[in-house]
Amino acid sequence: MVMKKKKGEAAEDEESGCKQLRVKGVRYLWESGIKRVPAEYILPLADRPGNAEIGSMINKKALELPTIDLSLLQDSGRRPRILKTLSKACKDHGFFQVVNHGIPAEALARLISSSRRFFRQPYEERAKYMSNDIWAPVRCGTSFNQLQDGVFYWRDFLKLNCHPLHTFLHSWPSSPFDLREEAMSYAKHTKGVFLVLMEAILETLGVARGMLHEFQQGTQMMVMNHFPPCPEPELTMGMPPHSDYGFLTILLQDKVKGLQVQHGDQWITVDPIVGSLFVNVGDHLEIFSNGRYKSVLHRVLVNSSKSRSSVASLHSLPFDSVVRPPPEIVDGEERLYADTDFASFLNYMTSHETKHKHFLESRKVVAASPAAKIN
Ligand SMILES: O=C(O)CCC(=O)C(=O)O
């Protein structure tokens, strides 16, 4: 005899069915052939991208993206000019692009290809790495901050802890076959780029370069992002406006547009330029520089026809180091932010929505109160 379900039970089933789908991620949803965006992904009107056509959001005056030619930093004659450009970019924009960084274009292409193949594997393969534990060294997930998002975002991700490499490498996905090798090579390369940039940034801030060895031992997290086509891109987003927690994020994107940065009161699309890397200032650098350099709000739009891939490499000080401005910076000056560390950010993530600059704002020192360490 078939028992008919009561109304409440049926609703519960439907709800748990949706939840099931939701946690399986957007690749899974897209592969299941959905024609509409499920309700959980629909942003309130005020938060929607405004137009599914990404190009139309750009200020047509087109911002000239500040560009740092990394090879010229080694040239003592040209270094002062590059430092000036770098300092201005960190101050006025919070982002810049890097060219002549020394990472072979083929290595970048291979990494994007491997990341793309990871997300195209059967769901069961991705599911091996799915976890809600934000402390997990390898974690596959979906949305932005899955634990706290009121509305879900059209993104799946794979996060890999990269420092120290020998500790984590064996736990990274072994399929596709080349993912470990390509990600390891990219992690080493981007660490090198980060150190060259940090050395230059310390110089622009007048901070002794002795600190550089701390950055050498610093945390590094690689995030492979996958944004499948979305049936109704005007209703949702790949990632909400947010800033990154670390000192610098080095971002590789494929040829599909989607990344936008906030500049003034406008959202500017960052056109992917083959072979170049996009770098943005994170919250830790804003805290370290006592607000001289600004972390930048950025977001990701999706589209209805093409998958998009990006790989972000996020760098900071060692896990237990306190992030605070050094004496050279705050000499007699009022502190804008309280001390922080990586663990504070992770703890914050478990109980708060981390979009916009919420975390950084939570560190703001209230006027006239002494800077205290808040955990
Ligand atoms: O996909 C992108 O272009 C940006 C990714 C991003 O903002 C992030 O991983 O934090």
Image: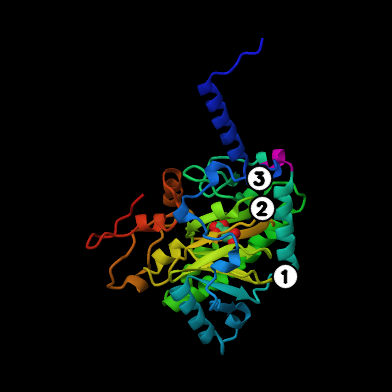
CA separation, marks 3 and 2?
Answer: 11 Å
Q: Quadrant of residue 360?
A: bottom left
Q: Earlier in the sequence, mark 3 or mark 2?
A: 3
Q: Is residue 196 among what the camera can see?
A: yes
Q: Please identify, in this view, whether the residue under mark 3 or under mark 1 is nearer the observer.
A: 3
Whether 367 is drawn above or below 332: the answer is above
**Magenta highlight: main SS:** helix
Give the residue type at disc 2.
Answer: Pro
Q: In terms of depth relative to the viewer, which is nearer, 182 or 224? A: 224
Kind of residue sitting beneath label 1: Pro
For label 3, the crowd category at 10 Å Cα-Cα, with few meaning under 14, some 14 to 19 and many 20 or more, is few
Looking at the rendering, in which quadrant would you find the N terminus? Answer: top right
Q: Which residues are magenta?
A: 122-126
The x and y percentages for residue 8 are 50, 23
- Asked if the beta carbon under badge 3 is closer than 8 A to the nearest atom of ligand 1, the reply is no
Q: Which residue is mark 3?
A: 35
* Of callouts 3 and 1, the N-terminal one: 3
- Label 2 within 8 A of ligand 1 by Cβ: no
Look at the image and say whether residue 123 sits in the magenta stretch.
yes
Give x and y (percent) for residue 290: 36, 68
- Is there CB contact under 8 Å for labels 3 and 1? no
Disc on res. 229? 2
Who's the residue at 63% across and 59% down the image?
311
Q: Residue furthest left?
A: 368
The first of marks 2 and 1 along the sequence is: 1
Residues tagged 3 and 2 counted as in contact (Cβ below 8 A): no
Does residue 320 appear anywhere in the picture? Answer: no
- For residue 104, the mark is 1
The kind of secondary structure element at disc 3 is loop
